[in-house]
Amino acid sequence: MRIDRTTYEVDLSDGKCEPIFVWEAPVRVWHWLMVVTMVAMIVTGYLIGRPLESNMGNTWDTYQLGYIRMIHFLAGFAFTALFIYRAFWALWGNRYAHQIFLPPFWSPKFYIGIWNQGLYYLFFKKSAPEYAGHNPLAAAAMFGFFIVGSVLIIVTGFALYGQAYGAGSFYDWLTGWVIPLFGDSQAVRTTHHVLMYVFLLFMVAHLYMASREDIMGGATEMSAITNGLRMFKHAK
């Protein structure tokens, strides 16, 4: 069984189907913690944009939105810490740990893999190659939607959060340039809110692709992010 050094495509033509240890424990723990923080951010972010009720009475008695905002901020800080942690592990982990941060966009075989995997997910092809790590389409989607999206949602989130601390604060030093770049705070808020829906769509697509591969594909997905092992159902 051979593994391509660029795309991590697995050659099963020799009939061997040994499990491959792909996801290390730090990556697996990070994945599930990130699921919790993303769900918390999306739910509370939606409720911030569309509050459950208006403040028509005593502020203390109707502090529901305050608690929702607090959970949103805590989840945002946790999300940021987890993202930084994952970026460091991309440098220190195994060869699969950096895949979503640096997909092989320089490789023609990578683009062929994206095309073939897309046809497979759309049911135009009955099968697709197996991969030790993320397949090319998943790696490209993780980079574009999750990595780039995370940077944008963190930057815009801290820019909005820092408004309460004013000029000269740590947050003003950190992200004070964001609002002038966008034009005004409402543009930043709109961008931040739209990114919430991007993350929601990404999570739905990610769950579909992983569960579909477990059911219809030739390799394990859902169990791999739990025990770290990519196992193959049969040789091709």
Image (tube, rainbow, N blue to C red):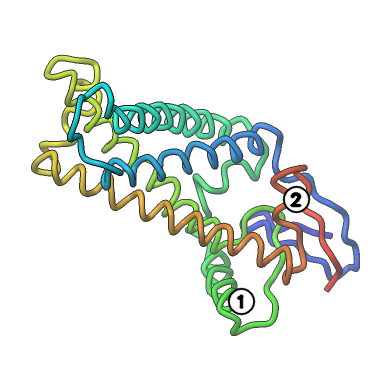
Q: Where is residue 43 in the image (x, y as percent from the top left)?
A: 41, 44
Nearer to the camera, 140 or 83: 83
Identify the residue at horizontal 69%, vertical 82% (top origin). Answer: 126
Q: Amino acid under label 1?
A: Tyr
Q: Where is residue 218 in the image (x, y as percent from the top left)?
A: 77, 67
Task: Tell me how far mark 1 sits from mark 2, CA to CA.
Answer: 21 Å
The quadrant in which residue 95 appears is top right
Q: Amino acid under label 2?
A: Ser
Mark 1, Cα crowd under 10 Å, few <14 / some 14-19 / many 20+, is: some
Q: Where is residue 16 in the image (x, y as percent from the top left)?
A: 90, 62
Identify the residue at horizontal 23%, vertical 31% (top origin). Answer: 159
Nearer to the camera, 187 or 5: 187
Nearer to the camera, 53 or 72: 53
Nearer to the camera, 49 or 150: 49
Identify the residue at horizontal 58%, vertical 74% (top origin). Answer: 121
Q: Going from the N terminus, do you reach mark 1 or mark 2 first?
A: 1
User: Mark 2 — residue?
Assistant: 223
Q: Which mark is residue 120?
A: 1
Closer mark to the observer between disc 1 and disc 2: 2
- Label 2: which secondary element: loop
